[in-house]
Image (cartoon, helix red, strand yellow):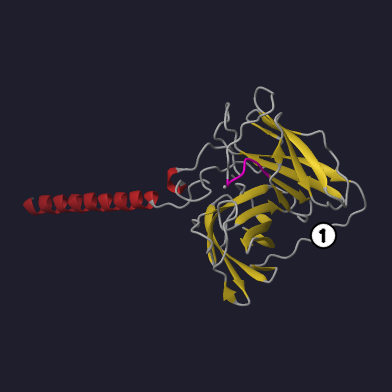
Amino acid sequence: MLTSACSTARRRALAAAGTAIVLTLTLAACGSSSTSSSMPGMDHSAKASSASASPSTGDMPGMDHMADGNGLSDSKDGYRLTSKDTALAAGKQTPYRFTVTGPDGKPVTAFAVDQTKRMHFYAIRSDLSGFQHIHPAMAADGTWTADLASLAPGSWRVFASFTPDGGAGKGTAFVLSRTLSVPGTGTKTPLPAAAKTAEVDGYTVTVNGAPMAGMAHPMTVTITKDGKPVTGLEPYLDTYAHLTAFHEGDTAFAHLHPTTKVNGDHGGPELSFNAELPTSGNWRLFLQFQTGGTLHTAALTLNVG
């Protein structure tokens, strides 16, 4: 009986120790998780509006103001993107005027600065060509004017990315959008095949990472020129590169947030991003970076599983 009792006690002690080990490992895994929900404010990126980033991402540049949702609505939480413009002329620079109204129906005039700007404005054609990223000017009455460059005929969607600095939505990042048409005869531009590299102005941009739909994944971008690493990236919008993505078929919006901290005019060659793309399929990525005072925009297609 004594032997049996000792054996039973020993088994209970081992089971307790095993439980403690499992609990410790579980807590450690939870504490180091990298899948906390995120982008903006790009931009920047876009899931359901949240006022701030989670504690585990709060130290990352660009992670403090991140818009929720896919940006395909003109209204959210009482805020609305309004414009009298439903069509713009093709082939020439054209101003697009719009207003953001708040839950009280009045134009919002107080906006927080996000990545050095109070408003980020994007335009993309339905075939994901013609990308434009503009920082419009606001009049005293809350009317914004975005000077769009020449637009090709077809259907376009414009996005406004902002964070109110007052009212019910203070501190919450929003991405709202509207569609507009550009009259004329246009042809659809086929979406380039998925690729990990893109060329722009003599630079080669390489993207590494395999994002999965609805999950946060780390992604790196490497920039080279003539086969040599580029280490002279200059700050652009308080980061070394601005990365925006649009989904094939519905032009859903996502801003991939940089996690590489800025340290003078010597960024690169490798930059880190937090990629959280809500749906599977092809996404067209637009990477903007600056060297020698010149802004470059590289584009490539990324397939998300």
The question of residue 93 being in magenta is answered with no
Residue 228 sits above or below residue 251 on the image: below
The question of residue 119 being in magenta is answered with yes
Relative horizontal placement of residue 229, taking residue 29 as reference (left or right): right
Label 1: which secondary element: loop
Which secondary structure type mostly characterizes the magenta part of the structure?
Answer: loop
Q: Quadrant of the C terminus?
A: bottom right
Relative horizontal placement of residue 60, taking residue 22 as reference (left or right): right
Magenta-drawn segment? 115-120
Relative horizontal placement of residue 154, taking residue 200 as reference (left or right): right
Residue 26's spot in the image, x, y percent? 35, 50
Residue 37's spot in the image, x, y percent? 51, 46
Q: Residue at x 65, y 58 (%)?
A: 288
Residue 228 sits above or below residue 68 on the image: below
Which residue is farthest left? 2
Residue 162's spot in the image, x, y percent? 63, 39
- Observer able to see residue 250: no
